[in-house]
Amino acid sequence: MTIFRSRLTATVERVNALDADLIAITGDFVDGLVCERIDDMQPLAHLRARDGVWGCVGNHERYWEWNAWNYALFGLNIWILAERHYYPKSVIRRGDDSIALGGLYDPSFFQFSESPEIHSVAQVAFFGTPKGAFRILLYHRPHTEEICSEEADVKLQLSGHTHGGAMPVLKWLVARYNEGHVRGLYEFAKGRYLHVSPGTGQWAGFPLRLFNPAEITEITLRRKAAGGSGR
């Protein structure tokens, strides 16, 4: 995204005002080199959530020195979730219930890999997490069929990538390449949901939004009552 320190400071203040348990950022943190943009990104270090600030990797990280940004984001107190990496903090417990966070790299990281298919199964995002936990997957692209989210028992997937379609005339094209997902909440299988963020910033390569505002999304999870319905 292209965003300057003053706007990011205001965004962080609005996010913190929600007093969230957990903050999730679904990739495309920044366009540019660390040496050029790290000062603008410093406000992210002030994000506050009881269960941490988590992220996954988008395709734009692939274009801009990801190894350097990975280190820089860790310095800003953002934990990046990736396949086959387990952090004890990524299992959140509330009494007898637990939530397991998982993440996948964007497929652009593996376009030159000899076996890219091993990175396209959501199950590997939950390496080491307990069975029976409510699984939340952070994956930049709003694809669920391609990565077998249902088979991996993902209950909630958080994605981005689409920029909300940018403008009405482009939504059909964006939907075509993203399994019909553009913006908002979808039930991709019975009792399983995908939320597609339109983004909080703006991509420098196409700096235009029309009838498609940027968004800070607040999601509330409620425990299903015994014998009742809910999500």
Image (spheres, rainbow, N blue to C red):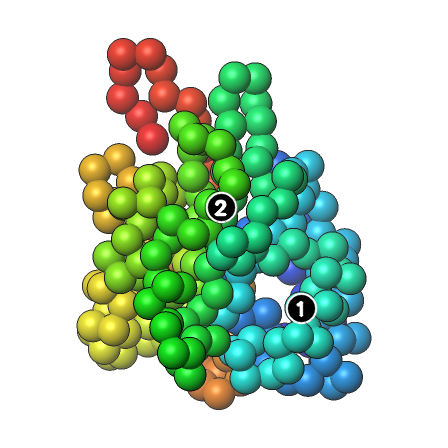
Point 24% across, 48% down: residue: 188
Dot 1: element: helix
Residue on which disc 2 sits: 127
The percent coordinates of residue 226 (x first, y second) are 33, 12
Query: Residue 26 vs residue 173: left or right?
Result: right
Residue type, numbered disc 1: Asn
The percent coordinates of residue 88 (x first, y second) are 64, 39
Query: Residue 208 vs residue 230: left or right?
Result: right
Query: Residue 211 vs residue 81: left or right?
Result: left
Q: Is residue 114 visible?
A: yes
Q: Quadrant of the N terminus?
A: bottom right
Residue on which disc 1 sits: 70
The percent coordinates of residue 42 (x first, y second) are 77, 67
Q: Which mark, residue 156?
A: none
Query: Residue 11 vs residue 28: left or right?
Result: right
Q: Quadrant of the C terminus?
A: top left
Q: Is residue 9 visible?
A: no
- The answer to whether marks 1 and 2 mark residues whose Cβ atoms lie closer than 8 Å is no
Point 59% across, 70% down: residue: 29
Q: CA distance from mark 1 to mark 2?
A: 20 Å
Residue type, numbered disc 2: Phe
For the view shown, which residue lies furthest in the front direction?
Answer: 114
Residue 16, placed above or below residue 40: above
Residue 67 vs residue 27, the one in the foreground: 67
Residue 41 vs residue 77, the one in the foreground: 77
